[in-house]
C-alpha cells in the first residue's frame, strides 16, 4: 500500500480541526479515528464510495450526530460543548431536499432567516443577494414544488448562505442530477467562492467534482487513506492505467504476474493494472502476452487510480460492497436492540 499523504495546516487560520474523531453504531465503526485540518477559505472535498463514512463525518461536524470519541472544532467552536455556536457559523445542504414544497422560494428563505435571527432590516438585501447568486431571483414567488431537482439544489445552497456562515457544508451537492445540471451547480459554487468569504467542505463520490477542490481526502471504510491536492495525489501514482479484456481474467492476471511481474486486478469488468509509460508497454504486451487480448485501453493517472492504489478497487466497484457492508451492520445493530 502507498504511504498516506497528508498536508498539515497552521492552527491559527483553521476553519475545521479534527483529532481522532470516531463514530460507532454498536460494533460497526462508521468513522475510525480521523485527523483533519482545513484552512479558512479552502474548498475541501471528501472523496469516497457511498458508505465510506463521509456523511457521518459531516453530521458530526455539523452537530447532528454526537461523536463516540475524539474531538472537533468548526469555526473555532467545539462540536460537542458549543453546538449552538457551531450551528450559527455553518450552512448545510443535505443530500435530500429539506425545502417546503408548498411555500415559495422567498418564503423558504425568510423562514430560515427567522430561525437564525437575522435582523429584519438585513433580510431583504441578503435574500436578493443569495437568490441572484444562484440565478433564482426571477422565481422567488414560485412554489418550490414547481422547481426541477437542480433548481431545488440551488435554492438550498442559497438558503444555506442566508445567515452568512463561515463554513458551508455540501453533502453530495449534485447527487441524482443529470450531467448538465451537475455542471451548472458547480458553476454556481465557483461563483459563490468569488463572492463570499467562505470555506466549503463537500462530500462527493464523483471523481470529476473532486478535481474542483483545493485539497481532497480520500475516505474508505471509515478512515482517511490519502489527503493532498488532486494534482499531487495523481502525481503520487506515477503510472498509467491499463485495462485489457480477455476471455479468462484469472488466467490473464496470472500471466501478467508470470510474464511481466505485474500485479493486476479485475476492476469495472476488465483486468486492470498500472505501468509507467503505458503507450510504450502496449506493443510489448501484444508481442509477449500468451493469451488473446480482445481490447486494451490506456489512460493517464486519475483520482480513480489513486483510490485504486490505496484500496485495491475503483470507487465504482467499491460503491456496492461498502454500502452493503454498512447496511448489513446497521441491520444487525438494530436487530440487537429489539
Image (spheres, grey):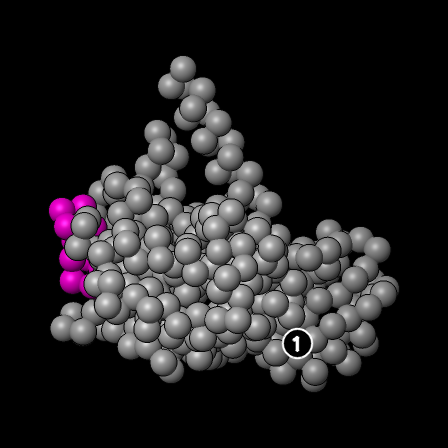
Regarding residue 21, the answer to whether it shows in the image is yes
- Residue 210 drawn at (x, y percent): 49, 69
Is residue 148 inside the magenta stretch?
A: no
Q: Which residue is mark 1?
A: 299
Magenta residue check for 75: yes
Between 32 and 187, the residue placed more toward the observer is: 187
Q: Write the residue at 51% across / 47% down.
A: 102
SS assignment at label 1: strand
Q: Position of residue 131 (x, y in %)?
A: 44, 70
Q: Left or right: where does residue 115 sit relative to residue 103?
A: left
Q: Residue at x 14, y 73 (%)?
A: 12
Of 194 and 265, which appears nearest the observer? 194
The vertical placement of 96 against 295, above or below, is above
Figure label count: 1
Tell me the residue at 58%/67% (across/down): 182
**In this picture, residue 110 sits left or right of residue 9:** right
The quadrant where residue 181 appears: bottom right
Rendered-image quadrant of the N terminus:
bottom left
Is residue 315 visible in the rendered structure shown here? no
Quadrant of image for the C terminus: top left
| Residue 169 percent location from the top left of the image | 36, 60
- In depth, the one of 303 and 243 nearer the eye is 303
Where residue 253 sits, quadrant-wise, is: bottom right
Residue 242 picture location, percent across and down? 68, 71
Which residue is rendered at x = 41% and y = 50% of the image?
55
Classify residue 314 as left or right of residue 254: left
Q: Residues within 10 Å of mark 1 (few under 14, many from 20)?
A: some
What residue range appears in magenta? 72-82
Question: Can you name the residue that lies furthest to the top here?
Answer: 338
Amino acid at each position: 500500500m502507498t504511504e498516506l499523504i497528508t498536508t498539515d495546516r497552521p492552527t491559527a487560520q483553521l476553519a475545521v480541526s479534527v483529532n481522532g474523531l470516531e463514530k460507532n453504531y454498536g460494533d460497526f465503526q462508521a468513522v475510525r479515528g480521523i485527523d483533519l485540518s482545513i484552512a479558512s477559505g479552502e474548498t475541501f472535498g471528501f472523496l469516497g464510495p457511498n458508505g465510506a463514512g463521509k456523511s457521518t463525518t459531516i453530521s458530526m461536524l455539523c452537530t447532528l450526530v454526537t461523536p463516540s470519541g475524539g474531538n472537533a472544532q468548526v469555526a473555532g467552536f467545539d462540536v460537542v460543548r458549543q453546538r449552538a455556536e457551531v450551528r450559527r457559523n455553518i450552512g448545510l445542504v443535505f443530500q435530500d431536499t429539506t425545502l417546503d414544497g408548498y411555500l415559495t422560494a422567498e418564503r423558504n428563505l425568510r423562514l430560515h432567516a427567522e430561525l437564525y435571527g437575522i435582523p429584519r432590516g438585513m433580510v431583504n438585501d441578503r435574500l436578493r443577494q443569495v437568490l441572484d447568486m444562484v440565478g433564482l431571483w426571477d422565481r422567488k414567488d414560485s412554489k418550490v414544488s414547481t422547481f426541477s431537482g437542480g433548481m431545488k439544489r440551488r435554492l438550498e445552497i442559497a438558503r444555506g448562505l442566508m445567515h452568512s456562515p463561515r463554513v458551508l457544508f455540501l453533502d453530495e451537492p449534485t447527487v441524482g442530477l443529470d450531467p448538465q445540471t451537475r455542471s451548472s451547480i458547480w458553476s454556481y459554487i465557483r461563483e459563490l467562492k468569488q463572492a463570499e468569504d467562505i470555506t466549503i467542505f463537500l462530500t462527493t463520490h464523483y471523481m470529476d467534482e473532486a478535481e474542483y477542490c483545493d485539497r481532497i481526502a480520500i475516505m474508505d471504510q471509515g478512515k482517511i487513506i490519502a489527503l493532498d491536492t488532486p494534482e499531487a495525489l495523481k502525481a503520487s501514482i506515477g503510472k498509467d492505467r491499463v485495462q485489457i479484456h480477455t476471455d479468462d481474467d484469472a488466467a490473464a492476471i496470472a500471466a501478467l504476474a508470470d510474464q511481466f511481474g505485474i500485479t493486476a486486478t479485475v476492476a469495472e469488468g476488465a483486468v486492470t493494472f498500472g505501468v509507467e509509460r503505458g503507450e510504450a508497454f502496449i506493443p510489448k504486451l501484444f508481442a509477449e502476452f500468451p493469451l488473446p487480448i480482445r481490447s486494451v485501453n490506456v489512460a493517464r493517472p486519475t483520482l480513480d487510480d489513486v483510490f485504486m492504489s490505496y484500496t485495491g478497487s475503483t470507487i465504482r466497484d467499491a460503491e456496492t460492497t461498502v454500502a452493503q457492508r454498512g447496511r448489513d451492520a446497521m441491520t444487525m445493530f438494530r436487530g440487537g436492540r429489539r
